[in-house]
Image (tube, rainbow, N blue to C red):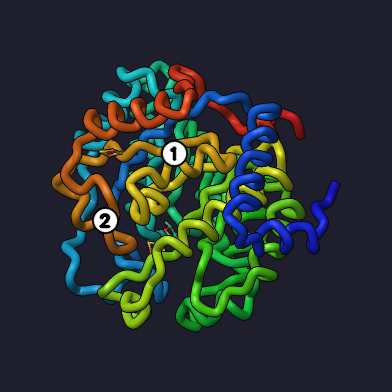
Amino acid sequence: MRPNKSELIEMLSLQNKDEVEALYKRAYEVKRQNCGTVVYFRGIVELSNICTKNCFYCGIRKDNQSTDRYLMGKAEVLEAARWAWEQNYGSIVLQAGEREDAWYVSYVNELLQEIKTLSNSELGITLSLGEQTEEVFRTWQESGAHRYLIRIETSNPTLYKTLHPADHSFERRLDVIRTLKKLGWQTGTGVMMGLPGQTIEDLANDILFFYDEDIDMLGMGPFIPHHDTPLKHLVQGYDGDAALELALKMIAACRIALQDINIASTTALQALNPTGREMGLLAGANIIMPNITDTKYRGNYQLYDNKPCLDENASQCVHCLENRIASIGETVGYKEWGDSKHYQNSR
Ligand code: 5AD
Ligand code: SF4
Ligand code: FES
């Protein structure tokens, strides 16, 4: 059933502490019934911070000169993938800034084929590599990737325009999401919560957007201003606690409204509170993406300020996360892809 907009607005507007807690509990119960209390890991490899785009909020935007640009070599990527596979992770995510040149597209393609080979096709592969053509999506799909994450950032085209340069197109972003669905990818999108100029109604519309586009997975996080971006003036006076609460309410409302999709408890939650990712799980999220990028690159993949785990390596993060998950009475689903139940249910 299509979610009711005024109910969504009501959930997202709650302020009273007890009522907010009750919302999280309700969302947790919906998660328990639809997805159980198993958390799926996707090891995230931050393949490259080279980006051709200039989103106003993002710390690795092209015009930010104060970050050193890198692209991980093939051996490094394969080593990270092998590590994840040996740790019994069901899947990995390759994430990077956006570029569409032919050399890069075929580099990614080689990586996909070699990761599939080294893991006897056991490791699931999710891509988070920005906007690409239908042809590229087909190629990467044939080489074994089966999930794609691309956030709409906001479903309000007018707000989208205020956060991106004129040549970044909301319509193309939407088109890409629809193309992925058409090609049969498990499709993930998401928004940032607390964007400058964003209203509660915008967030309610985002949830309706997820429903209408039949989205399988969500990755959403609080907007956190970065000191080297055009939005740096928002660093001062930024209220992290309020941002965290809004983000958690959004996760909870999405779980209640959309039921059986996968929802990630994102790193940005942990940037605002050391236990932010546990809070995300308790508000209805069921996916965690442990960072498995070599620590030498992490300092240069700062999309927002205060990103955690700069110095912790993959194995430290995973043990830390295992403990965090155990602390709230949940378990990790090793060796399973943990596909979106929504995707399975809608086939
Ligand atoms: N705060 C929070 N999230 C951000 N992202 C980019 N910049 C920021 C920021 N300042 C998110 C975007 C993008 C994802 C890879 O990172 O939503 O889609
Ligand atoms: Fe590039 Fe993505 Fe950052 Fe935009 S949000 S500048 S596309 S990495
Ligand atoms: Fe990275 Fe805790 S999640 S050290």
Asked whether residue 36 is in view, the answer is yes
Q: Which residue does the numbered mark 2 point to in the structure image? A: 301
Question: Residues under labels 2 and 1: Cα distance?
Answer: 23 Å
Q: Residue at x 37, y 43 (%)?
A: 275
Quadrant in the picture for residue 295: top left
Q: Which mark is residue 76?
A: none
On screen, residue 78 versus residue 340, left or right, reads left
Q: Residue at x 21, y 57 (%)?
A: 300
Residue 281 position, x and y percent, is 51, 38
Three-letter amino acid code of the residue under disc 1 = Glu
Residue 228 position, x and y percent, is 26, 74
Label 1 CA crowd tier, 10 Å (few <14, some 14–19, many 20+): many
Q: Nearer the viewer, residue 211 or 134?
A: 211
Q: Which mark is residue 278?
A: 1
On screen, residue 77 versus residue 30, left or right, reads left
- Contact (Cβ within 8 Å) of mark 2 with mark 1: no
On screen, residue 292 versus residue 123, left or right, reads left
> Quick one: SS at disc 2?
loop
Three-letter amino acid code of the residue under disc 2 = Tyr
2 vs 1, front mark: 1
